[in-house]
Every structure is written in structure tokens, then in C-alpha cells.
Image: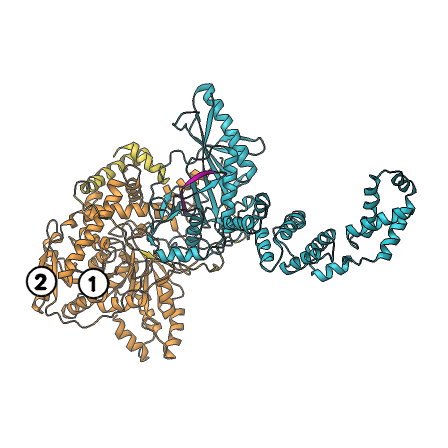
């Protein structure tokens, strides 16, 4: 589903919003039992489609009027539960909409449902969800990636035209790459975080997942902008996706991310993408960002520390899970958190609390913040020379459910490619650039200078127009 | 990291573990801390870590924005009796 | 052995902003429970704090009034701990870089230094019922400034004087309404004692949440005695948190909820560091209302009021504002001072209010009438209290009470004649040379003629009358 095409067809009345939405609902009905992308389907979807149709008929359509959009379940919606895939928020319906949700509603988008994720966005497989497993449409024995696994799988399986995910250390880019779709992590501050349940406040960003960079750009335009309810949000320089000439573009291939444990097939796909850019006249060379080797520990210390504080509000007093018959305030709180947080969440809270403890603060949290600053400077320096940086999104393609690393350190190290852009606050996207022998998608990551979101989207768009993208074999089964 | 540390952290974050869980969390944290400790020896320029961004005055104006239907308006939130 | 008390204070003052410090909920006292709440102050998932400009301005105003250094770059930090009245399980406060540093107040010739003034958020109200505890979050997120002194205070009286002076600054600066009974001003005291001549501070105990001036004095005095007793008995004072119980007039150890707690402070990533320029700070300074000290100088130097009278007028902002307004439109300062401190203050106390429902112009005109002897001093008092309690203007009050001096000599003569006739034995006594009974007769005449004639006139006519007998 190409948004621009859909828009044209819909505005010409050749296809109605209801038809598009019905198609999505039918696909969901046929296949989501297997894929497991959705936690909640909006019972009012067709009603919204009808409302949207009125606008379209009156000639007042916006870009997303009548278009089915999926939302990661950490985005607050007043009319649908927002669980963050946790038992802690089972059945919780917030009394307000997230800023991005408000914007989409204002356009008349059809919010088709809430999408599965790793619990509280902590993870890279969506397998820590309390509610269900999401499977990769390309191979249902494999994970869709995470934490926005449901968002990526839904777009990949054609359950909706586009979706919103969130990226703290790679949670949009990695599942996009595993599921063979495009996903963008915007520049920090570009999109309001108001109403996005906070994981790590200085790193979280909401971003688009779609079947093309072009559609990501359209969705970004719909959701970006300074919001007075989020003091970290800023108005970025206005821009759009554009045809770029690749001649003379300087692209840096990040050395530190193509060595080590990167699988051969992944490397091959990324290198062939780099080669393609070269063939179009770009200069591609190796660039070294030595501090990147500390990016994973720095990321985990900062994100876990902030998360440990952000998740403290979940105590069963005002909302959320409460154990039955607590005898005291203590047992109310500790029972709530004991029963309703999963293991990964507990791990991060332990790590985060430790990093902030008196006596350890300087060595861990503070040091990590200083490291992030140094990494930011390294990137800034690289962008004095390069227009964009290339790398894999993940050292490997989607792994099977049986092969999820159990050792946490090993698990965390798999994030090596994605965390550093988050630490630096830079925009970065994933676009499919190849397939493994098993038919699994491999993503190319393009990182841009601060505020150059549309620049990297344009670079991706150029590549995508030449690249033969595969759809998941699964879809043949579903259709 | 040993059990006393986890116990202290568990108290600070109000998440309690069974003995078995304590053991497992301890193991996990040992692995994780080995990874985290890799940042200890790297040299950092002294001025690193300056602020993420600067909030320029004038901030939010002091104008009331009434919240539509705050949950529990007119009612109290209730918890078990606290003994002080 | 003589012991010197060493006292430091932490004063929490709720700011008079229209909204809370991090959200747009109304900051008002006495609203229906849990009605001034929103996702931000309730700590709901996805909500974010947004810093209130006015709260920053008022904090800086407080600092300027106390001679503090205003920081150009300030940070907000998360102070992490669990308690049901704290909705996010962290309080946004300022540890590493507060808005105001240093400064202090001079109290009776001694300079009491401040350590800092910083801005933070208040918690909700936790009330214990018989079987449950209940929570009202209207107060959660109300802006609070914390004023921390150095341990420079040396007596309970000095502590009270300090709090009074600080409260006055805050009230005059439109920063805080100073209503301790409503909890908008709370005092914690850190108290220790050390042997005279020593320069090593003793172990201190913290007395929390004292909410009236009387209690400040008593709690501190009790604690000093208690600590001296402890030192003389077993040589030790425990470092602990205590609370003052008014009923027993004692302090008790609290089962400490924050025993050596690790708050794990770190800069709040939702609230970026705040940069204030010199111009921003000067702008705030320019908007400050006239501080009490400069008014004091005006009252004593320019108007020649006594120190005591000046302090009395200054003790309540509404009195000082009223006084200033009257003088501004031409009232004689001494007469205005007497009337404000006298009849108006009496009326205010009787009404139990903190307002003067008399217009400044009517007040000033009334003073002028008395000055021109068109009404007596008694008449002035009557006019003021009548206007105060009946909410009418001066003309109405004067008419209703017949206050204009008529100097109707016929009437005066008639009244005097009547009184003299009614007390022949007293008149005899006077005639026999007992001059003291004159005041009784004079009093009778004054009562009957109440305000209709000047005392001097009554005096003269009475003497004439007596002489004619």
C-alpha cells in the first residue's frame, strides 16, 4: 500500500476508505492469529473510515484521511487500551491521547489498532510481551525484532498501510530490518513524546514504519512538530523528501559496525548497497568512530537509569495492576511490581538503580553520559566530511525463537549498530537492502546529521526505487 | 555484584525476589556488569558531559488549563492504612 | 556546663502561582478533592512535566529579596523514593544547581546566612483514616520553594524572628501567602547543641513540619532542653528525625521513612537545563513590589513614625498597602498610622479577616474631617468601624451616626443643666473643692453628647455651668 497512490485513488473516489480498511481487517482476521501483531483491534475502525469518507467526498482530505494506521501499544489512546505489552497496564485506558495520536485523528486517519511490543519497549525481539508472541511474516519461526515488532510485522504483512513505532536504542530500525520494511528514527526532539509511555526520556523517539522511505517521510510530516507539552521537542527545519542527485555524495561506511560478529550475508547485503551508491556516483569510504565500541554499555547504563525512575510510577496506587487484598502500602506496591513486571523489565530496573546509586553514580551513570557526549562529538565531526553514514542495522538477520540469546550481555551486544545514533540524538533509518539464503531481509542503516531526516529519507528513496523488494512469502499464504 | 547489592536495589525499587530469583538476577547482573565495566578505563576529555540542550527562558506561561474530567474528581484514592 | 544551641532552618513555601509548577492545573486551596489534577501531576504514563515560568520568576524574586546570587544556569533533578503522596515516585527538585545561592537576612543585628533557595514540587495530601489511608492529589505538583539557612541561628526566639521576617518578605513579594495554618508555609528545624567555647557542632536532630509560630518556639526550646539532658545523661544525641506534638508540647522520634535513603539524584531529562540571562533577571527585579524594608525606612525616616509603629503596620501586608495608599492620596501619615493601628486593626481582628472593606478615599476623608474638628476622635472611630462592618461610604456613616459636630450650645447647655440637676450631691462635692468628681461629670456629658461636641467645648461649658450654680 503506497500512501501517495492510495491518496490519489481515494481522492478520485476510485477506492473508498472503507474498502481499504476492510481489506486490512480481512487480512488481520485471516492471518493475525499466526502473526500476532495486534493486541487490540479498534472496533470503531469502519466508523472512522465512514467519517473520513465524508471529508474525502467534500474534498477536504489530508494526506492520511481514511488511511489505516497501526499504533505501537506504548502510545496513549483514549479509546483503546494502552498496555505497553505489560501486565502492569492490563486493560488500562488512558484519559488522554498522545500528541501523535491527536495529529493523526485530526487528519482523519483510521487508527486500526494497537500493536504488540517488548514489554515497556525493553527488548529486541518482542518476545518479552506479556500477552503474545509476534512472528516474523517472512518466517514465522523467527522473531520480528523489537521492541516495535508488532508495528513492523503489521506493515510487512499488509495489515495496515503504515504504523508508528518508537525507537530508544534501535526499536524501530531493527524490527523494520528484520521484517523487510522501512523505518525511521527521527532526530531527537523532532516528534513530541507527550503520550508515549516513557522508557528512556533522553533517547525515546516515536517514528514511522512503512513499506517505503517515501511513506515514512509522509508519516513523519504528519506527526512532527514542537509541542508545548514536551519541552524537549523542537521545531525542525521544514523539509520534504526530494529527488537527490547521488553524484558526489559522500557516504561513510562505519568501520566499527562492520567488523566483529556481523554475519557474512548481512555484510554482503550492506556492502552491495554501498556499491550501488558508488555506481550512482557517490563516494563511499570507510570511516572510523572509535568510541562506538563503548556505545552499548553507555546506552544500557543511561537508558536503564532513566527507565528505573520512569517506571517507578507504576505502584498500583492510582492505576494499573494491584495485587488482591494487600495488607499494607508496602505489600501493595511491591506486590504490584513483583507480579506485573516481566524479567527483562526487572533486570533493567536493577541495572538502572545500581548505576544511580550513591557511590556508583560517577562511575556508571555520569560516565555513560560523558561517553554519549564524546560519541556525539565523533559523529558531528564525521558529518563535517560525510553527508550520511552507512552500516548494517543488526549483526544478524532475524533469529528463531529458540535462538534468542539467554545471556543478557550477549543479547545487549546485538544492539551495537543501532544504539549510538540514539545516544547522539541523530536521525537514522533502516531500508531493506538484501535477503539471506533463507529469504530473510537484511536492512541497511543510513544515519544522518542532526535534522537531516528528510535528507537520509531521500537517499533511501533513491535506493529503494532501484531495489527489488520482496514481500513475505507468508502473504501468499494469507491471501 | 552479590546478593546484598541486589537486595539493596530490590528495596530501593520495591521489587522483591524469591531466593531462586535472587540467584538468577545475581548471575544476570554479573554478566551485565562485566559489559558495563568496560567503560571504566576509557579516557574521556574533562569537559565531556555538558548538558544535552538548553531550555531558553520564557517557558510555560502561568495560565490555567483545566483538565477534562480528572479521574476520581470528588473522591479519594484509597490504599491500606499506613502506620507512621 | 553551658551549651549553645545551633539551629538551621528549612522553610518550605508554596508559591502563589495560578498553576502548578509542571502542569496547567489550578493552584488553589480548598478545591474539591482530586479535581485540580491531570495526567502530568497524577504521574500517568506518557505525561511530561513542563516548567512554569512564573514559578521560576517567584523563586528568583525570593532570592533577590534575600540578597542571593541568582544562577544563570540551573538544573532540575529527580529525587527518587516511594511514598503514596508522590505520584511519579520521584520528586523533581534541584540538587546540583539551584536557582539561588547564598544571601541571608539580618535579624536584630545578627546576619543569618542562607545556603540556597530552590524550586521543587509539592506532594499530594495523605490522610489516615481508621482503616485506610486516603489521598488527595490537588496539592501534588504545587510549586514549592525550599529556603535553607546555614546553622547560624542561636536561639528559639531568633528562629521565630527569622521565620517572621522571611514570611514577611515572601508575602510582600507576592511570592507566598504565608498562611501557616493552611500549610502554605512549613518549617523544619535542624537543632544541635555544643558546649560553650567549642567550635565543633554536635549531632543534630531534625524536627519536621512545624506549622505555627508558637510551635516553632516551643518545639525548639523543648528540643534544646532534651538534647542537653541527653548529653548530660549519657553523652549522646542520636541523629534522627523527630516531630513536634502540640498537645504534649514535646518532640517525638519519627519511625523514619527516609532513613539514610539513597535518593539516586540525577538530572531530569524531561526538563532541560535552564539558562537565564542578566536581562531576564533584571526584568524580574524590576517587577518586584516594594519590599518591606524600604517601606520601613520610608515610615521611620520620611514619616517620622516610631520603629514599633512602623513594624506594626508592616506586620500585615494589607495594612501596609492600605496605609501607603492613604498617604499617597494625602492622608497625614501620623493620623493614618494611628487609625490603621488602632480602630482598623481592631475591626480586622474582630472580623477575623485580612481585608479592609473601607475605601482608601473614605478613610482619608474621615481623617481629614477629624483633623478639621468636624468630627471628634470618637466620631472618627465610630465612622471607621461603621463603614467597616456595614460596607457603606463615609457620608452615610456620618449621617447615620450623627457624627458632625454641631456645637449647638443650646443643646450642650441643656444636657449639662440636666446632668448637674440629676447629681446635686456630686455638684456639692465639687463646690466643696473636690475637683476629682469633675471627671465623672465630664464623662457623663461626653456620653450624652457623644460626638456632637468637641471635648474641649464640653469641658469649657461644664466649668461655666458649674460656676453658675
Q: Nearer the viewer, mark 1 or mark 2?
A: 2
Q: Is residue B16 visible?
A: no
Stretch of the chain drawn in magenta: C108-118
What's the residue at 10%, 68% (across, down)? A248
What's the residue at 70%, 60% (across, down)? C394
Residue C302, percent from left and from top: 55, 51
Say which colour chain B has: yellow
- Report the side of A290 relative to B53 (left or right): left
Q: Is C114 in the magenta?
A: yes
Under tag 1, what secondary structure? loop
Name the residue nearer the viewer: C289 or C357. Answer: C289
Q: Are marks 1 and 2 in contact (CB under 8 Å)?
A: no
Name the residue nearer the viewer: C326 or A433. Answer: C326
Under tag 2, what secondary structure? strand
Q: Chain of mark 1?
A: A
Where B34 sits versus C388, above or below? above
What's the residue at 60%, 60% (across, down)? C329
Name the residue nearer the viewer: A45 or A395. Answer: A395
Say which colour chain C has: cyan
Query: Which residue in the protein does label 2 denote?
Result: A284
Residue A151 falls in image quadrant? bottom left
Query: Which residue in the protein does label 1 denote?
Result: A472
Q: Is residue C332 visible?
A: yes
Amino acid at each position: 500500500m503506497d500512501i501517495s497512490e492510495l491518496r490519489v485513488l481515494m481522492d478520485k473516489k476510485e477506492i473508498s476508505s472503507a474498502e481499504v480498511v476492510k481489506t486490512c481487517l480481512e487480512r488481520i482476521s485471516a492471518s493475525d492469529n499466526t502473526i500476532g501483531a495486534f493486541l487490540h483491534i479498534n472496533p470503531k475502525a469502519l466508523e472512522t473510515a465512514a467519517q473520513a469518507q465524508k471529508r474525502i467526498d467534500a474534498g477536504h482530505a489530508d494526506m492520511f484521511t481514511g488511511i489505516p494506521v497501526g499504533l505501537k501499544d506504548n502510545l496513549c489512546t483514549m479509546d483503546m487500551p494502552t498496555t505497553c505489552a505489560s501486565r502492569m497496564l492490563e486493560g488500562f485506558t488512558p484519559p488522554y491521547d498522545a500528541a501523535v495520536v491527536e495529529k493523526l485523528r485530526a487528519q482523519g486517519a483510521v487508527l486500526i489498532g494497537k500493536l504488540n511490543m517488548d514489554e515497556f519497549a525493553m527488548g529486541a525481539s518482542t518476545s518479552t510481551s506479556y500477552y503474545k508472541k509476534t512472528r516474523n511474516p517472512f518466517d514465522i519461526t523467527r522473531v520480528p525484532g523489537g521492541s516495535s515488532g508488532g508495528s513492523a510485522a503489521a506493515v510487512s504483512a499488509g495489515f495496515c498501510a503504515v504504523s508508528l513505532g518508537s525507537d530508544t536504542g534501535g526499536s524501530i530500525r531493527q524490527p523494520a530490518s528484520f521484517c523487510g520494511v522501512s523505518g525511521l528514527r527521527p532526530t531527537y526532539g523532532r516528534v513530541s513524546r507527550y503520550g508515549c509511555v516513557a522508557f528512556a526520556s533522553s533517547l525515546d523517539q516515536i517514528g514511522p514504519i512503512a513499506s517505503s522511505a517515501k511513506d515514512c517521510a509522509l508519516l513523519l510530516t504528519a506527526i512532527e512538530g514542537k509541542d508545548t507539552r514536551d519541552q524537549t521537542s523542537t521545531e525542525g527545519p521544514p523539509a520534504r523528501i526530494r529527488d537527490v542527485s547521488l553524484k558526489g555524495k559522500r557516504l561513510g561506511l562505519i568501520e566499527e559496525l562492520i567488523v566483529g560478529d556481523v554475519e557474512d550475508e548481512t555484510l554482503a547485503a550492506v556492502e552491495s548497497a554501498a556499491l550501488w551508491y558508488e555506481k550512482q556516483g557517490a563516494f563511499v569510504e570507510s570511516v572510523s568512530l572509535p568510541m562506538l565500541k563503548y556505545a552499548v554499555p553507555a546506552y544500557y547504563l543511561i537508558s536503564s537509569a532513566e527507565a528505573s525512575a520512569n517506571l517507578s510510577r507504576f505502584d498500583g496506587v492510582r492505576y494499573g495492576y494491584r495485587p488482591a487484598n494487600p495488607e499494607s502500602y508496602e505489600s501493595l506496591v511491591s506486590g504490584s511490581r513483583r507480579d506485573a513486571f516481566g524479567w527483562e523489565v526487572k533486570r533493567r530496573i536493577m541495572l538502572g538503580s545500581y548505576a544511580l546509586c550513591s557511590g556508583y553514580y560517577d562511575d556508571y551513570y555520569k560516565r555513560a553520559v560523558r561517553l554519549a557526549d564524546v560519541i556525539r562529538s565523533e559523529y558531528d565531526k564525521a558529518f563535517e566530511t560525510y553527508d550520511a553514514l552507512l552500516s548494517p542495522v543488526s549483526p544478524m538477520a532475524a533469529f528463531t525463537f529458540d535462538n534468542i540469546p539467554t545471556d543478557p550481555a550477549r543479547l545487549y551486544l546485538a544492539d551495537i549498530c543501532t544504539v549510538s545514533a540514539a545516544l547522539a540524538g541523530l536521525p537514522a533509518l533502516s531500508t531493506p537492502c538484501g535477503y539471506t539464503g533463507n529469504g530473510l531481509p537484511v536492512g541497511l542503516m543510513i544515519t544522518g546529521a542532526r535534522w537531516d531526516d528528510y535528507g537520509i529519507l531521500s537517499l533511501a528513496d533513491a535506493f529503494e526505487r532501484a531495489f527489488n523488494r520482496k514481500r513475505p512469502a507468508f502473504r501468499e499464504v494469507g491471501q | 555484584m552479590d546478593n546484598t547489592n541486589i537486595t539493596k536495589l530490590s528495596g530501593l525499587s520495591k521489587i522483591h525476589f524469591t531466593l531462586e530469583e535472587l540467584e538468577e538476577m545475581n548471575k544476570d547482573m554479573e554478566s551485565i556488569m562485566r559489559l558495563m565495566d568496560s567503560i571504566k578505563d576509557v579516557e574521556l576529555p574533562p569537559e565531556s558531559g555538558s548538558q544535552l540542550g538548553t531550555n531558553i527562558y520564557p517557558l510555560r506561561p502561568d495560565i490555567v488549563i483545566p483538565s477534562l474530567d480528572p479521574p476520581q474528581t470528588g473522591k479519594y484514592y484509597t490504599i491500606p492504612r499506613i502506620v507512621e | 556546663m553551658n551549651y549553645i544551641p545551633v539551629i538551621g532552618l528549612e522553610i518550605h513555601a508554596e508559591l502563589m502561582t495560578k498553576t502548578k509548577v509542571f502542569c496547567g492545573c489550578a493552584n488553589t486551596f480548598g478545591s474539591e478533592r482530586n479535581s485540580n489534577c491531570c495526567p502530568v501531576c497524577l504521574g500517568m504514563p506518557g505525561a511530561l512535566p513542563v516548567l512554569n515560568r512564573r514559578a521560576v520568576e517567584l523563586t528568583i524574586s525570593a532570592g533577590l529579596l534575600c540578597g542571593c546570587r541568582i544562577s544563570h544556569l540551573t538544573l532540575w533533578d529527580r529525587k527518587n523514593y516511594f511514598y503514596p503522596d508522590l505520584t511519579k515516585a520521584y520528586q523533581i527538585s534541584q540538587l546540583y544547581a539551584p536557582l539561588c545561592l547564598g544571601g541571608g537576612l539580618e535579624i536584630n543585628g545578627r546576619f543569618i546566612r542562607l545556603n540556597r533557595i530552590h524550586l521543587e514540587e509539592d506532594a499530594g495530601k495523605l490522610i489516615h483514616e481508621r482503616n485506610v489511608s486516603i489521598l488527595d492529589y490537588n496539592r501534588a505538583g504545587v510549586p514549592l520553594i525550599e529556603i535553607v539557612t546555614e546553622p547560624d541561628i542561636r536561639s528559639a526566639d531568633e528562629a521565630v524572628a527569622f521565620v517572621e521576617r522571611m514570611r514577611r518578605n515572601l508575602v510582600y513579594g507576592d511570592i507566598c501567602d504565608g498562611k501557616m495554618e493552611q500549610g502554605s508555609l512549613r518549617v523544619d528545624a535542624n537543632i544541635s547543641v555544643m558546649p560553650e567555647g567549642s567550635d565543633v557542632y554536635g549531632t543534630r536532630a531534625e524536627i519536621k513540619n512545624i506549622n505555627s509560630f508558637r510551635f516553632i518556639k516551643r518545639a525548639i526550646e523543648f528540643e534544646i532542653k532534651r538534647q542537653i539532658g541527653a548529653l548530660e545523661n549519657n553523652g549522646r544525641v542520636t541523629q534522627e528525625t523527630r516531630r513536634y506534638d502540640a498537645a504534649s508540647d514535646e518532640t517525638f522520634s519519627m519511625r523514619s521513612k527516609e532513613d539514610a535513603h539513597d535518593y539516586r539524584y540525577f538530572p531530569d531529562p524531561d526538563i532541560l537545563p535552564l539558562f537565564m540571562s542578566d536581562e531576564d533577571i533584571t526584568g524580574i527585579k524590576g517587577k518586584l513590589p516594594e519590599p518591606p524594608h524600604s517601606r520601613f525606612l520610608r515610615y521611620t525616616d520620611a514619616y517620622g513614625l516610631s520603629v514599633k509603629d512602623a513594624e506594626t503596620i508592616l506586620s500585615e501586608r494589607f495594612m501596609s498597602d492600605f496605609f501607603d495608599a492613604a498617604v499617597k492620596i494625602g492622608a497625614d501619615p501620623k493620623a493614618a498610622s494611628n487609625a490603621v493601628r488602632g480602630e482598623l486593626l481592631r475591626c480586622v481582628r474582630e472580623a477575623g479577616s485580612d481585608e479592609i472593606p473601607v475605601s482608601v478615599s473614605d478613610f482619608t476623608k474621615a481623617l481629614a474631617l477629624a483633623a478639621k474638628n468636624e468630627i471628634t476622635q470618637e466620631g472618627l472611630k465610630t465612622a471607621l468601624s461603621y463603614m467597616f462592618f456595614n460596607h457603606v461610604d463615609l457620608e452615610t456613616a456620618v449621617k447615620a451616626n450623627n457624627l458632625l459636630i454641631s456645637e449647638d450650645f443650646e443643646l450642650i447647655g441643656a444636657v449639662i443643666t440636666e446632668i448637674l440637676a440629676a447629681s446635686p450631691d456630686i455638684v456639692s462635692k465639687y463646690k466643696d473643692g473636690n475637683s476629682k468628681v469633675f471627671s465623672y461629670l465630664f464623662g457623663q456629658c461626653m456620653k450624652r453628647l457623644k460626638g456632637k461636641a468637641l471635648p474641649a467645648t464640653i469641658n469649657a461649658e461644664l466649668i461655666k455651668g458649674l460656676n453658675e450654680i
